[in-house]
Image (spheres, grey):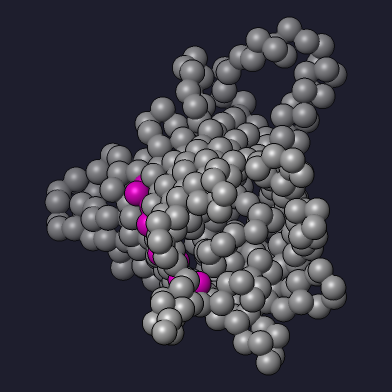
């Protein structure tokens, strides 16, 4: 039970912002939905993805190569919490549209139900899900636009909430230079049915910009994603904290303030790199760094890999299998597995003479 309570806290704060933690509901929408995203720091909106999974955060990544792409993803989160996502994409050449639909879910597990005297009265469970429908289309040369519509439901014991949200996205891709850039506004919307009338329940709104560049003479792609660009200050101001930083503790107040702003700047950024191996690039190694996660979840006085992530991916016949891990805290890491395929591969085999 204590571990599950810790998990609820982590879901409210560690995914993105401790400064804004507790201000939003449905924060499971911010969790990485695939092993690839987990490995790349938990966030990436610009890198082209051979699967359709990335469309949950940036629907503009969908194009004709996503036709009949099918993806299944499951994350083993803390304290037995299960988080997953699956989706399917389909291209309509006559309408020049690429569509996708997906289902994201999270189950927090079973909890003991007690009264104010700590007398056990049974158990209850908690879970949330979101059904997403999205579309993408080329609007000008190398520029694509995308949109997602999400229907969201949350059940926490006897409390139930319902909401509708959307994403707006632009993707600019230059294939000959292997460069892409994206702008996404996530989770525009609101609650239609609140947990309790009178509550202030807002969506986990986010504005993100990302760029990805593959080196011309090396099989490596680098990505940088900026998040919460609509809000500059991500620092957690805790007057009770006694944390000391030997790099800035003895500095003048003006220089100390400058260093804090540098720290705040990097809290907005997530870095990722992907190495492609093999003639057909069937094996991939990924690594990521999330500075905000590290600064918020590092335990004072202890060294840890909080904020670091990594993973691998490989293709066997018609299937692509990916694994990713994200280190959140000394308590452990979250592990993510994905399996994806393209139904066209099966059709080609059937049509062979």
Q: Which residues are magenta?
A: 69-77
Q: Residue at x 85, y 19 (%)?
A: 254
Residue 182: x %, y % from top left? 75, 59
Q: Is residue 133 visible?
A: no
> Who is closer to the viewer here, 242 or 45?
45
Above/below status of 212 relative to 258: below
Residue 217: x %, y % from top left? 74, 40
Residue 35: x %, y % from top left? 46, 51
> Who is closer to the viewer here, 342 or 208?
342
Q: Is residue 230 left or right of residue 71?
A: right
Above/below status of 141 relative to 251: below
Question: Dividing the image into 4 quarters, which one contains the C terminus?
Answer: bottom left
Q: Is residue 245 left or right of residue 284?
A: right
Numbered marks: total:
0
> Who is closer to the viewer here, 38 or 249?
38
Q: Is residue 256 visible?
A: yes
Above/below status of 286 relative to 298: below
Q: Is residue 339 left or right of residue 210?
A: left
Above/below status of 256 relative to 275: above
Q: Residue at x 62, y 40 (%)?
A: 273
Does 175 appear in magenta? no
Does 76 appear in magenta? yes
Please tell me whether the stretch drawn in magenta is mainly helix, strand or loop: strand
Q: Residue at x 76, y 67 (%)?
A: 170
Q: Residue at x 56, y 53 (%)?
A: 280
């Amino acid at each position: 039970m204590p571990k599950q309570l810790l998990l609820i806290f982590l879901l409210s704060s560690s995914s993105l912002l401790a400064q804004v933690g507790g201000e939003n509901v449905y924060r499971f929408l911010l969790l990485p939905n695939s092993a690839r995203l987990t490995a790349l720091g938990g966030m990436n909106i610009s890198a082209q993805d051979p699967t359709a999974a990335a469309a949950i955060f940036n629907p503009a990544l969908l194009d004709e190569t996503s036709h009949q792409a099918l993806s299944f993803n499951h994350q083993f989160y803390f304290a037995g919490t299960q988080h997953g996502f699956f989706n399917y994409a389909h291209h309509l050449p006559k309408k020049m549209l690429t569509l996708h639909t997906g289902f994201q879910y999270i189950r927090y597990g079973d909890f003991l139900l007690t009264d104010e005297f700590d007398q056990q009265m049974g158990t209850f469970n908690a879970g949330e899900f979101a059904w997403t429908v999205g579309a993408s289309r080329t609007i000008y040369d190398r520029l694509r636009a995308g949109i997602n519509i999400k229907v969201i439901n949350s059940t926490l014991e006897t409390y139930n909430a319902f909401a509708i949200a959307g994403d707006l996205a632009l993707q600019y891709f230059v294939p000959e230079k292997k460069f892409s850039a994206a702008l996404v506004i996530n989770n525009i919307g609101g609650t239609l049915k609140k947990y309790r009338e009178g509550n202030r329940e807002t969506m986990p709104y986010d504005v993100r910009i990302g760029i990805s560049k593959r080196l011309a003479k090396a099989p490596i792609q680098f990505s940088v994603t900026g998040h919460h660009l609509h809000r500059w200050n991500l620092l957690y101001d805790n007057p009770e904290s006694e944390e000391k930083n030997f790099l800035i503790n003895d500095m003048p107040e003006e220089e100390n303030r400058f260093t804090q702003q540098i720290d705040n700047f990097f809290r907005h950024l997530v870095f990722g790199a992907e190495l492609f191996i093999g003639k057909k690039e069937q094996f991939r190694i990924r690594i990521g760094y999330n500075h905000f996660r590290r600064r918020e979840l590092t335990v004072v006085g202890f060294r840890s890999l909080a904020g670091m992530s990594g993973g691998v991916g490989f293709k066997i016949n018609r299937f692509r299998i990916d694994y990713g891990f994200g280190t959140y805290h000394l308590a452990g890491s979250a592990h993510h597995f994905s399996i994806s395929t393209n139904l066209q591969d099966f059709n080609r085999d059937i049509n062979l003479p």
